[in-house]
């Protein structure tokens, strides 16, 4: 079997793209999107007509409603290809506004349901800020499932588990990027690869904690830079992978042994912790990498959301 098929034996494979025409060849169960991926897709000739058609249908509507129609239109197309769920992201500019995030999530889910898609097939993506996690707590209580994104630290993961969120997306590659950049010329790639990759170690710890303490939240490693990171997390609940890396996995016959196992994780020497708002904010502040990458991620997604805004507003 190729590496992709081997991986699917013990990990749910998710496609990380807005390019739904690429999906079928990899047969993922779910798919995730974000503002950057949607922006990238709508600039391609294959998807420009979909954007133009959606914008023309809702010309004159409030701009934020038109944007949500575009996001959901992509989600609907993705759901024609994947048998499982699609993740659709709340505007990153609402990352520190709990009430506004809840309201936006309500609207996105209502659009899917109006199109005949049950809410069980939709994950609302929200940034893993304190406010985002509390918004997810409210939404989950209402039966709206959430994917907490831009997650870089243990405290974010624990708070998400406590909030009962359906799924978290710890970012492997961006953690790796930060440590590599910070180390500069002192970076040793060989010593920081595979199971020793800092992003891999972060996800492995979160996975072990959740399994040991029976936390139902699914762990989905995200933001991969290379095949080694993916193989080192084989056995994680889910992994969301770009089409480029999915193709690389499909082209290789190298072995993919299971690295993460729920029963082995239960033996991990980890102690239970909990966070209130004050201790969460302090723990996040105390993690320089997580603080910087969270803020950077929100800024980047917000910038791409603004670019999509301008593209839509400029359309006839």
Image: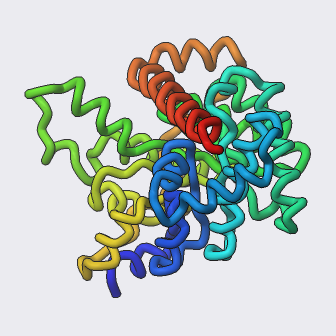
Q: Quadrant of residue 308?
A: top right
In the displayed structure, does residue 67 sit left or right of residue 297? right
Residue 49, how many percent across, how many down?
59, 61
Residue positioned 49% across, 22% down in the render:
295
Does the rendering let one see residue 275? no
Residue 237, how many percent across, how many down?
55, 61
> Which of 231 and 120 lies nearest the eye of the viewer?
120
Residue positioned 41% across, 65% down in the render:
243
Does the rendering let one see residue 141? yes
Relative vertical location of residue 163 with respect to residue 7 in this rendering, above or below = above
Q: Residue furthest left?
A: 185
Residue positioned 50% across, 50% down in the render:
37
Q: Which colour assignment does the render follow?
A: rainbow
Image quarter hosting the N terminus: bottom left
Relative vertical location of residue 267 with respect to residue 297 in this rendering, above or below = below
Residue positioned 58% across, 56% down in the render:
32
In the displayed structure, does residue 143 sit left or right of residue 195? right
Residue 256, how many percent across, how many down?
33, 73
């Amino acid at each position: 079997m190729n590496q992709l098929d081997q991986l699917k034996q013990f990990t749910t494979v998710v496609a990380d793209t807005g390019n739904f025409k690429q999906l079928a060849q990899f047969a993922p169960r779910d798919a995730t999107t974000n503002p950057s991926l949607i922006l990238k897709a709508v600039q391609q000739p294959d998807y420009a007509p979909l954007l133009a058609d959606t914008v023309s249908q809702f010309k004159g509507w409030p701009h934020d409603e038109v944007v949500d129609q575009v996001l959901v239109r992509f989600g609907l197309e993705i759901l024609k290809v994947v048998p499982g769920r699609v993740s659709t992201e709340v505007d990153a500019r609402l990352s520190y506004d709990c009430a506004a995030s809840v309201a936006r999530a309500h609207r996105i889910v209502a659009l899917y349901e109006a199109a005949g898609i049950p809410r069980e097939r939709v994950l609302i993506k929200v940034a893993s800020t304190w406010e985002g996690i509390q918004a997810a707590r409210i939404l989950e209580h209402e039966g709206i499932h959430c994917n907490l994104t831009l997650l870089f630290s243990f405290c974010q993961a624990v708070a998400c588990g406590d909030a009962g969120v359906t799924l978290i997306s710890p970012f492997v590659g961006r953690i790796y990027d930060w440590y590599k950049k910070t180390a500069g010329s002192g970076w040793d790639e060989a010593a920081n690869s595979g199971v020793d990759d800092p992003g891999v170690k972060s996800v492995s710890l979160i996975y072990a904690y959740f399994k040991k303490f029976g936390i139902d939240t699914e762990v989905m490693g995200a933001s991969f830079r290379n095949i080694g990171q993916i193989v080192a997390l084989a056995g994680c609940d889910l992994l969301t992978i770009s089409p480029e890396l999915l193709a690389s996995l499909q082209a290789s016959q190298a072995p993919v042994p299971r690295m993460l196992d729920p029963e082995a994780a239960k033996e991990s020497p980890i102690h239970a912790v909990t966070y209130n708002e004050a201790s969460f904010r302090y723990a996040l502040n105390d993690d320089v990498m997580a603080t910087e990458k969270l803020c950077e991620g929100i800024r980047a997604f917000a910038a791409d959301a603004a670019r999509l805004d301008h593209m839509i507003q400029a359309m006839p």
